[in-house]
Amino acid sequence: ELKVEQNPLFLSMQEGKNYTIYCNYSTTSDRLYWYRQDPGKSLESLFVLLSNGAVKQEGRLMASLDTKARLSTLHITAAVHDLSATYFCAVDRRGYSTLTFGKGTMLLVSP
Amino acid sequence: DTEVTQTPKHLVMGMTNKKSLKCEQHMGHRAMYWYKQKAKKPPELMFVYSYEKLSINESVPSRFSPECPNSSLLNLHLHALQPEDSALYLCASSQAGDGLNTEAFFGQGTRLTVV
């Protein structure tokens, strides 16, 4: 059974600081996704990581994938309040988009 | 058009009611999904349709009945639900098959409350 573990589950940080969210998964997979969810809203796709060593950046967020370590990271640079949300990583376990999600990291960025 | 449209956005139903959730996409995707998300929890896969055929049922109770009438539409029929079924129901679609381009696009969800 595929398990996806995220940490931390809650992150309170000040604006301007850097931090990293970690996502570990238990079985081989070459497809990992990061999503953002605002309260009461649906999932917004942030990054699709499809191969070992993949690195993608969008604004203050950068995601990477190490399939050998079964680890993905989401790095936040110089956080701003608008980044406050819950971030999920998800692993595609059987092809298609049969996703198993981590528990999510609730990020709160304060001045 | 990269949109997945779900209706209704909100639904309140009694435990004896029958209702349906609807999902539509026009991206030419041949795989469609229902996920359930309870408050402060991650989404959980319920059903997968591939080429209009049910390919995955994650042991979902029979009071949830999916239907895929054509390649653009996905329904979830609800009957005799329990209050614990209250959740955000998310529809998604993607390319089918094992190719790399199987990113899921999610709809805005239906917030269901069972009273």
Image (cartoon, coloured by chain):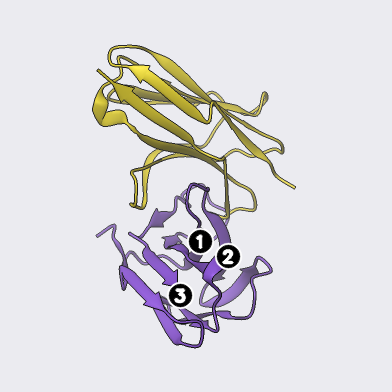
Chain in purple (letter):
B
Residue A83's quadrant in the figure? top left
| Image quadrant where one finds the C terminus of chain B | bottom left
Whether residues under marks 2 and 1 lie with C-beta atoms below 8 angstroms apart, the answer is yes
Is residue B59 positioned above or below A48 on the image? below
Callout 1 and callout 3 share a chain: yes
Label 3 crowd bin: few (<14), some (14–19), many (20+), radius 10 Å: some
- State how far apart marks 1 and 3 are (Cα): 21 Å
Q: Residues within 10 Å of mark 2 (few under 14, many from 20)?
A: many
**Which of pointers 2 and 3 indicates the residue nearer the eye?**
3
Q: Nearer the viewer, mark 1 or mark 3?
A: 3
Residue located 39% across and 55% down the image: B105
Mark 2–mark 3 distance (CA, rounded to whole Å) = 22 Å
> Subunit of mark 3?
B
Number of the label disc, if any, that sits on residue B115:
3
Q: Earlier in the sequence, mark 1 or mark 3?
A: 1
Q: Give the label on residue B46, or none.
A: 2
* Sequence-wise first label, 2 or 1: 1
Q: Is residue B2 toward the left or the right of residue A100 in the image? A: left
Q: Quadrant of residue A19?
A: top left
Are labels 2 and 1 on one chain?
yes
The secondary structure type at the circle numbered 2 is: strand
Badge number at residue B35: 1
Say what amino acid the circle numbered 1 marks.
Tyr
Q: Is residue A94 visible?
A: yes
Dot 1 and dot 3 residues touching (CB under 8 Å)? no
Out of B27 and A37, give the one closest to the viewer.
A37
The chain assigned the colour yellow in the figure is A
